[in-house]
Image (cartoon, coloured by chain):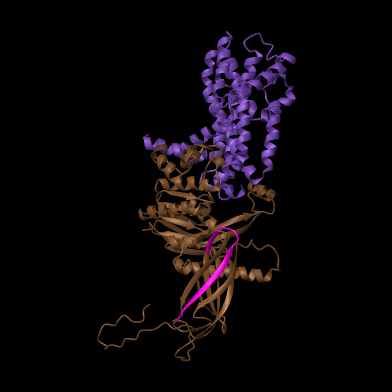
Amino acid sequence: MRFSIPFFIRIAARLLRIASLDHLWRQRVLLREMVRREIHAQYIGAVGGVWWALFRPLITLAGYYFVFSVVLAVRVSEAPAGSRDYGLFLVSGLIPWLAFSEAVVQGTRSLIASAQLLKKAALPAELFPASSALAPAVSYLPFLVLPTVLAWWSENAPFWGLVWLPGWIVLQVGLMYYLSLVLAILSAALKDVAQMVRAVIAMLIFFSPILFPIERVPSLARGVLWLNPVTPLVDGYHSIVLFGRLPDLHAFVGVLAWIALLALLSKILLRRSRAQLVDWL
Amino acid sequence: MTALKVDRLGKAYRMYATPKARFLELITGKPRHTPYWALRDLSFELAPGETLGIVGRNGAGKSTLMKLVAGTLQPSEGSVTYKGRMTAILELGTGFHPEFTGRDNIYFGGALMGFSRAELRSVEAWIEDFSELGPALERPVKTYSSGMVVRLAFSLVTAIRPDLLIVDEALSVGDGHFQKKCIDRMVHIRSKGTTILFCSHSMHHIMQFCGRAIWLDGGQLMDSGPPAKIVPAYVAHAVEGRSAAVLEAPESDTRPQQRCVVESVVLLSPGQTVTRGERLVVEVRFRILTDGLFVFGVAFDRSDSKTRTIAETSLENGFAPVSLAAGEHRVEFGVETECLRAGRYEVHAGLLDETLLHIEDYLTVEIDLVDRDPIQSPAVMRTGVDWDLQRQFGMVSRGGES
């Protein structure tokens, strides 16, 4: 078999279509413009501007640190390896979580919020959840400094393990994109979905190993936690940041299974709704 | 060569009893809707540089057609094909971000239309100049009036000449000066080969600007042809429908506010009795209550039949709608009576709005037309036919053509 360049392009094009990313690829210039717009639009008119994007997560972080580490004295592990202090644990789970919840809440609303635009310009629906998923991924990137500094600062931390982070971030963006896409189409059909998502997202943090290690959860309830797509995701971040190793197999399987499921679901929903999606908004 | 081809195009909106039914259909894939056809079985083709005007009442399917061609709606059946680049102004504006300044939106809105940054940079100065927004260009678009939004949108969609331009009702919010500028610009890009799909409630614009028109009603094509044929047919139909509705409705104050009052219609010359061939001059005195655009209209009805003999507006006679300020005015018009058959006529004279769809006010006077040479004829008109008899082998001469 000859592997010419057109052959790879054909394969790539087919893969993009299977993953319903082909429209996004064609509109990539616009996608970049929309991500920039989404980030700007949030802080436009505010004197503090983009600094709020940095400040708000830090406040949340400090609040959780105070309650769980100082007041409740949560220990991450009884194991002797001293590097796994609560601060690093909290940072490595909470920052991805904040990006995730922001992406999903905004992504669910994205089609309804862009109704005016969709009625006036011919654009693929995927563009809006995609920019909602990418915007927090970009605006939270500066926080990579936190685990890096903390890991570098505490001598036992596995500094070089952080090279796995970008790959895991890409998986998180994929998860956020497909979840947002599914929820955005559903909420275009029924506005109640957007309200429900807000409520579920507010609760989801307590059903994932972000504020406390999963070992602290009674083994019976652990199964429930693993149904949450955030659990394998955060577990992977913990492996990378705290132990400097590749995420465990069950984290990989969990995240990839969710991505595959949501991608399939979004494909079905897109096929059923593409022709009348704009009419619903 | 075809620039735009619309082939058996149709759009059915899915009507659901409740949003829940819509959600369940999406989840289960089992149909729970009833289709409503907003447009059905419409076909036409346009050549490069052609302009098609679309007329019809609200809900006739005009906007649906515009959106289907622009691609913001997906057709339920049939197809739309065109070559090259298409830009559109639908429902007053285009994809602008309200929080961004006008200048940012040149780039954002331009990106939505598929223009590259480099292209937009090259026309930024032109847009700034044409839109006449001045310092407002640095303000967020949310602070703009609808007229300002349209000025920016129109500048953007025509800055880089598209192959197909769609303009839906956009000009109605601009002031007269900008409307004229837009028409001039569209005439210019049309001469370079841009095909234009144009929808307006202003019959003046359709007549003045379009080479062809189609008339839609209830999602169906009623008629198509030159605007000079389509517009009067549509106006007659629309006014008829309206007067029927007025007759059915009990007296109420739901009528739109009256904008003018016709106070008198006087026969200046020759008087109530007119000999055929004399020029009838009529003076109309009226009071404008609210400033606006008006068109004058006159109609002759024969008292002995239901046929309307003459119905003309100043628009058809080459007058643009006139802008009149509140206060007293008078207008004079003359009609040649050479072609009219003898008899008694009711002459209605008054004012219409600039869309020709609403008769603002009128008064009626009667005239008696007498003929110098009364030959009994069943015809309504006399046109003065030239007879030219020639030998059989000669060329047939031009005769009787008007």
Q: Colour of chain B?
A: brown
Query: Would residue A212 be visible to someone looking at this image?
Result: no
Seen from this angle, which residue lies furthest left? B393
Asked which quadrant contains residue B360, the reply is: bottom right
Q: Main secondary structure of the magenta part?
A: strand
Asked which quadrant contains residue B258, the reply is: bottom right
On screen, residue B391 versus residue B48, left or right, reads left
Q: How many marks?
A: 0
x, y (%) of residue B317? 45, 68
Q: Which chain is purple?
A: A
x, y (%) of residue B121? 40, 37
Q: Pick the residue in front: A151 or B210.
A: B210
Residue at the spot 64% in from the left edge and 61% down from the top edge: B257
Residue at the spot 49% in from the left edge and 50% down from the top edge: B89
Query: Would residue B342 be visible to someone looking at this image?
Result: yes
Residue at the spot 59% in from the left edge and 15% down from the top edge: A243
x, y (%) of residue B316? 46, 68
Inspect the magenta stretch and tell me whether residue B289 lies in it. yes
x, y (%) of residue B63? 54, 56
Q: Say if A121 sits above or below A140 in the image.
A: below
Inspect the magenta stretch and tell me whether residue B265 lies in it. no
Q: Pick the residue in front: A71 or B137.
A: B137
* Quarter of the image that includes the N terminus of chain B: bottom left
On screen, residue A111 versus residue B231, left or right, reads right
Q: Say if B226 sits above or below B67 in the image.
A: below
* Quarter of the image that includes the C terminus of chain B: bottom left
Q: Which stretch appears magenta?
A: B278-294
